[in-house]
Amino acid sequence: MTLSGLTIERVETFAVALPTLRDFGVAGGAVAVAGRPSIRILVKVSADGMCGWGEATPIPAWTYETAESIVTTIDRYLAPAILGRPAWDLDGVTAVFDRVINRGFSIGAPLAKAAVDIALHDLLGHALGVPLGVLWGQRRIEQVQLAWVLSGQTPAEVADSVAEGLAAGYRAFKVKIGLHAERTDLAVVAAARAAAPDAPLWVDANQAYAVDSALRLARELHGLGVTEFEQPLPANDIGGLRRLRVLSPLPIALDESLRHPTDLATFIRLDAVDVAIAKVQRTGGLTLSRRLCQLAQDSGVRLMGSGLTDSDLGLAAALHLFAAHGISGPVDLNGRQFIDSVYAGETTVQVSDGVAQVPTGPGLGVEVDEAEVRKRAVDVLAAP
């Protein structure tokens, strides 16, 4: 099979209700609530009798895109703009996306764009019968260590969650802070450290603090053996992040600040970043994420990995990206901890004792049960 004649014929969206396994919150609010379905937007791109699948994870507590906006953005803007285009022209698709939904102050609907971009990658891999690493000519590792994510409301809840993670075989932990006052946040981290005294442990504030409070916390967290302080300040507070990076005893890792590779270039020029977080959906898909990772590595900036509580399609996409750039972990790919990807067949991502194997099947390496997707699809645009 050659790719030159592979033309995009159809783009379909499915808002799929997946079972939620545990509660999960960030500084902005709840991400998942046990017993309440978690909505993921799955995208199917078809061409010449073949298809590829992608995923978007609407988390309004984290960013502005909702399930409704992702569906309408893809169906009414992105899909019509790429029908009839060559499926292999990922760079051209990215340029078209930037025209039909322009960047503004952000890069413009990155979650929606990511879902289509991931599906195109999956399609190309299936067309050639190879996994993404072979498609890219870049696969440096075969497995990635995952971290167990802690977002408990009290020190006791966090200690219990650490015990649960250890029992499941996880040996690294990430603590969500910014949910409480400073002293409570510190008590939560201290509880995590006491429960896992030798484990890699980092914290993620999801933009919750101002510079002074973040600096106070960084000094205390350093004493608890925390390894990195992720996104302590608002994404666009470049001056504050530069100041904090100079004064903090902890490395400052940027997530929400890095929507596009050019954002990373700005932080590098200003000497305002220690660690860049690779996150597929935040950066609009695999095409731009690969550019961001390469820029970081070429500039001597350390890379870490993260996700958006993705189901198995998003999990697989992130694993392929991390494998291509040698990001062996620990990483925050927490989908398996919080949701059940019931649409994925047996040929999917294998996780054991907190270690994920990079898929080896064609494309993403995830077998999608389309009948299950359609059965669980809901109409998010229907009147409440």
Image (tube, rainbow, N blue to C red):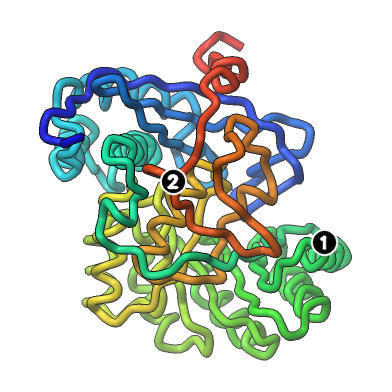
The residue shown at (50%, 59%) is 306
Kindly indicate the quadrant of the structure image that contains residue 332.
Answer: bottom right
Q: Nearer the viewer, residue 374 or 138?
A: 138
**Figure check: 257 above or below 89:** below
Q: Quadrant of the C terminus?
A: top right
Residue type at mark 2 is: Gly
Task: Choose the circle earlier in sequence order: 1 or 2.
Answer: 1
Q: Is residue 109 visible?
A: no
Label 1: how many Cα within 10 Å (few below 14, some 14–19, many 20+): few
Q: Give the residue displayed 44% in from the left and 46% down from the top.
A: 361
Q: Secondary structure at mark 1?
A: helix
Location of the N terminus by quadrant is top left
Write the residue at 68% across / 59% down: 179
Residue 45 spot, x, y in % from top left: 33, 26
Judging from the image, what secondary structure is the residue with disc 2 in? loop
Q: Which mark is residue 164?
A: 1
Q: Using the image as rendered, state which of residue 317 and residue 98 is in the foreground.
A: 317
Q: Amino acid at mark 1?
A: Glu
Residue at the top extreme, as displayed:
383
Closer to us: 346 or 47: 346
Q: Position of residue 87 (x, y in %)?
A: 20, 33
Q: Which residue is mark 2?
A: 361
Residue at the (73%, 31%) spot, across then down: 36
Image position, residue 123 (x, y; %): 32, 35
| Distance (Cα) linking label 1 and label 2 | 31 Å
* Label 2 Cα neighbours within 10 Å, binned few <14 / some 14-19 / many ≥20: some
The numbered mark at residue 354 is none
| 49 left or right of 345 in image | left
